[in-house]
Amino acid sequence: MTQVTNTGFKELFYDSDLILIIDKNGKVLYYDDFDDNLNMLKKENVIGRSIYELYPFFKREDFTVFKAMDKKEPVLNEYQSFRVNGNKKNCLNNAFPLINETGVIGGIVISVELSSESIKKKVKKATSRYNFEDIITVNKKFKKSLEILEKVSKNDSNVLIIGDTGTGKELIAHSIHSNSNRRNKPFIIQNCAAIPSSIMESIFFGTSKGSFTGAIDKEGLFESANGGTIFLDEINSIPYDLQSKLLRTLENKKVMRIGENIERDIDIRIIASTNEDLVEKVDKGEFRADLFYRLNVISFSVPPLKERKEDIEVLANYYINQYNSVLNKNVTGISKDAMQVLFNHEWKGNVRELKNVIEYALNFSEQGVLSKENLPQYLLKSTDIRAEECIIDNSLTSMVENYECKIIDDALKACKYNILKTSELLNIPRQTLYYKLKKYNLY
């Protein structure tokens, strides 16, 4: 869990351009815009009004504060660009849900306007919030790789994080920056898949006044992150025609705004992530090989949850404790039957899916231990289907295979899906175990 001191909050508020608190329906409960040239309203004229009245050009999905409320967790350092009356606004938002025993009751957003004169002072506050000790795992291989990554984090080499959706790539990016020599400098996050390709170039590199209708002088993400780190999440989503400019920026350590012929020096470290195989995209001609090599100086793969099943129990208990506080419950653990269901599941959504499953289960339990019946139905159905796959027909061969399947499945559960321990328990070579796991679709 991350704690923020009162002093930290005061500093955060002091260096912000906007503080806005709303209830769950979007009604404004508190409003303080220190340089309000957008609404031109006093705070007493805003309280009680809808957030949609203040920002009629936004849809619900555009508000960082609603994203935090929907996710029930903070959304940190989200870059936002929008146009009002022909003028572009560029902000860096931090939003937090307000939660009590009844659930989410509102949210708070704290925003810094990147185009303000004090940008260099303020953007320094947009730094990482997590560290390596916040990463929960008991998997020896994963822990060892994290220890190595922590050691090299202090260097300035670019890092490419590879992992499926929901494995915690952003948490690792935060941790790298927190352990780097740039830890007190800006840390800016941008999900590349969330930006329309038509405006991606202007967001990355900035614009100069007159470069196109309504354009103003503004710095892009790379200038805003100068001296620090920029995390490009889902970099596999960047259009091919923009990749060459990104490569040139990384190689020359200079950025040129749209409509300018002036190169500006920048000093940044790139952390990028992908949920696709970039080597395969390079082979298909969908991703530039030279950009891949520039990003892939240090490569770090985040294993999916199905490959570190010993983490399921410790993560489940962690989220039980977390949601006990959020939902005002008193759940003390999880039953053996329920834990077996969790072990048997494939976890295509990885840690994020497990977190959502535990939240679901706690909504249907007040105290004691979580039972199998508290879990979502789709988990129970997938377990039943998997058990049926062991049954082939009634021939002697099939009955022997069915019995073997059950013995291996029981051994896997007893060893918490540790392959080495399971092979030793069954007294068979690991290669034989892998063959039988594949044969019976057990892993």
Image (spheres, rainbow, N blue to C red):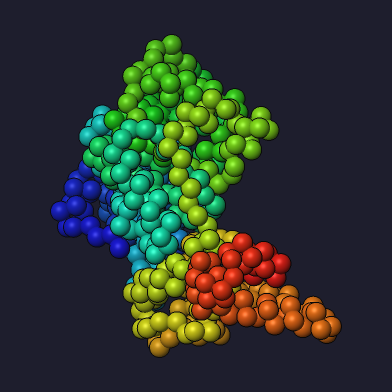
In the rendered view, does 402 fall on the left or right side of 352?
right
- Using the image as rendered, state which of residue 56 and residue 338 is in the foreground: 338
Q: Residue visible at 38% across and 36% down? A: 230
Q: Residue visible at 50% across and 55% down? A: 303
- Using the image as rendered, state which of residue 371 and residue 141 is in the foreground: 141
Instruction: Report the number of numbered marks.
Output: 0
Q: Position of residue 423 (x, y in %)?
A: 55, 70
Q: Position of residue 340 (x, y in %)?
A: 54, 79
Picture quarter with the N terminus: bottom left
Q: Position of residue 145 (x, y in %)?
A: 40, 50
In the rendered view, does 341 fall on the left or right side of 328?
right
Q: Residue visible at 39% across and 29% down? A: 222
> Which quadrant of the figure has residue 375?
bottom right
- Using the image as rendered, state which of residue 396 and residue 237 is in the foreground: 396
Q: Position of residue 260 (x, y in %)?
A: 44, 14
Residue 312 sits above or below residue 81 on the image? below
> Which quadrant of the figure has residue 430?
bottom right
Residue 394 visible in the picture: yes
In the rendered view, does 196 fall on the left or right side of 45?
right
Residue 6 sits above or below residue 373 on the image? above
Picture quarter with the C terminus: bottom right
Residue 85 visible in the picture: no
Q: Which residue appears farthest toward the bottom when viewing the image?
A: 368
Q: Residue visible at 35% across and 47% down? A: 148
